[in-house]
Image (tube, rainbow, N blue to C red):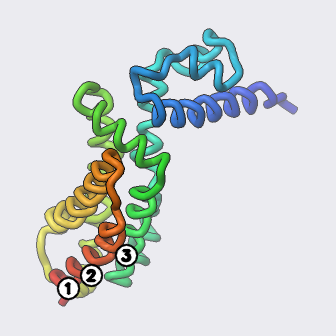
Amino acid sequence: MPDNTGVSKKAGTKEKILKVSTALFSQYGYKGTSVRKIASEVGIRESAIYNHYINKEAIFLEVAKNIFSSPFSFNDEEIKELALRGKAFLQKYTMQYKMLTFDKSNENMFRLLMIELMQNKSLREQFMSEFHNKNIQLLSEGFFIMMQNSLIRSSDPMLIAYEFISTLFYIRLQVTLLRFDAHSTNNLSTQFEKHVDFFWESIKI
């Protein structure tokens, strides 16, 4: 039998690098986090990092990819099943979005990503493909199924997807900005549910 110990160990180290990097980037930002600091926290030599990633930017992009792609892992069958329940589809999607918004670690990374988006072309491309395009596609598929089953009015499903997610994104941004200056976000905690209620009433048949 082949010995997979080395492969497993390498995968475990890579996973630890990502976990540590996420925490460090969240706390110190991109510029304030060095490869040396990451290696020290992981418990390996700095040179060993390069067995897994070519540079700090590669680590950051991998961390960002996880932040972008982790929340909404619906497969095609789940999308169809939920979409046939109409409003329940929007409620589940929004609940996941809300949980991410108020998760401290994710919030710190979101804040960092908003800053770095203006400075890193690779990150912008990744944001568009992993977050924007995938979420618009997921929502569009759900809205299209609802239209086919006469749950909502017939329209452009992609435009409806844009309309729906834009408010969620704005609420998330507002929460991040308020927390940055240590202001209360209590009055925003119910805005996600209110958005779903309002939006559903505006599109349902």
Disc 2 versus disc 1: distance between alpha carbons? 6 Å
Mark 1: secondary structure: helix
Q: Residue at x 74, y 32 (%)?
A: 8
Q: Percent position (x, y) of residue 95?
A: 41, 69
Mark 2: secondary structure: helix
| Quadrant of the snapshot with the C terminus | bottom left
Question: Which of the two residues, 69 or 26, is positioned nearer the viewer here?
Answer: 26
Q: Which mark is first along the chain, 2 or 3?
A: 3
Whether tag 1 and tag 3 are in contact, CB under 8 A, the answer is: no
Question: Which of the two residues, 101 or 64, is positioned nearer the viewer here?
Answer: 101
Disc 1 versus disc 3: distance between alpha carbons? 13 Å
Q: Determine which residue is flagged by label 1.
A: 201
The three-letter amino acid code for the residue at tag 3 is Gln
Q: Is residue 71 above or below residue 163?
A: above
147 sits left or right of 131 in the view: left
Packing grade of label 2 (10 A; few <14, some 14-19, many >=20) is: some
Q: Determine which residue is flagged by label 2.
A: 197
172 sits left or right of 157 in the view: right
The three-letter amino acid code for the residue at tag 1 is Glu
Disc 3 versus disc 2: distance between alpha carbons? 9 Å
Q: Determine which residue is flagged by label 3.
A: 91
The three-letter amino acid code for the residue at tag 2 is Asp
Q: Is residue 100 above or below residue 10?
A: below
> Can you tell which quarter of the image residue 167 is in?
bottom left
